[in-house]
Image: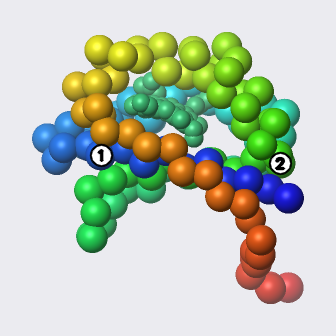
Amino acid sequence: MSVVKINAITVPKDKQERFEERFKGRAGAVESTPGFEWFELLRPLEGTDQYLVYTRWESEEAYRAWESGQDFARAHEGGGSDLAPAASDSSHLWSYEVIESAAPDRP
Ligand code: HEM
């Protein structure tokens, strides 16, 4: 059963451009991580000011291995004081289990 890990980050309006720029220059290592299934950066349009970093994994173990490994550390190297001004200190990790999913039924 896949698991979804969402990092919800509140980014003040004046930092959004910089925040998105950082993701454009992201490490790109997660793609080749065992058990990785999907990544999306979601920009808020209305109802919230939280960006969502959506990731889906084959298993909890696969996520944990990535999160505790060097690729995660490298992807967040700017970390701490450098990330803080871009993202404020407001970040939450949400965990879900996929219980149903669908893709378009096209020929
Ligand atoms: C305080 C916590 C976090 C902040 C502020 C943050 C912010 C960022 C930023 C700005 C980047 C773009 C690269 C960079 O400039 O460093 C990035 C990369 C990324 N973050 Fe986070 N992040 C945090 C924790 C997490 C967590 C817990 C997850 C788990 C879902 C996650 C998932 C990712 C992914 C998948 C990438 C792209 C990695 C790649 O390209 O290989 N982040 N993050």
The residue located at (61%, 52%) in the rendering is: 95
Q: Nearer the viewer, residue 41 or 67?
A: 67
Residue 3 at x, y percent in the picture: 73, 53
Q: Tell me the crowding category of disc 2: few under 14, some 14 to 19, or many 20 or more residues within 10 angstroms, Cα based.
A: some
Secondary structure at numbered mark 2: loop
In this rendering, position of residue 35 left or right of residue 86: right
Amino acid carrying label 2: it is Glu
Determine if residue 49 is in view.
Answer: yes
- Taking 43 as reference, is 21 above or below it? above
- Residue drawn at (37%, 51%) of the image: 51
Q: Which mark is residue 97?
A: none
Residue 66 position (above or below residue 3): above
Q: Where, by quadrant of the figure, is residue 24 drawn?
A: top left
Q: What's the residue at 27%, 70% (across, down)? A: 47
Quadrant of the image for the N terminus? bottom right
- Residue 77: where, in percent of width, then height? 48, 14
In this rendering, would 98 be left or right of 58? left
Cα separation, mark 2 vs mark 1, equals: 27 Å
| Residue 45 drawn above or below residue 102 | above
Inspect the image, locate mark 1, and give the three-letter code of the amino acid beneath it.
Thr
What residue is disc 1 on?
10
**Residue linked to disc 2:** 58
| Residue 25 makes an appearance in the image | no
In the image: residue 85, left or right of residue 7: left
For the C terminus, the image quarter is: bottom right
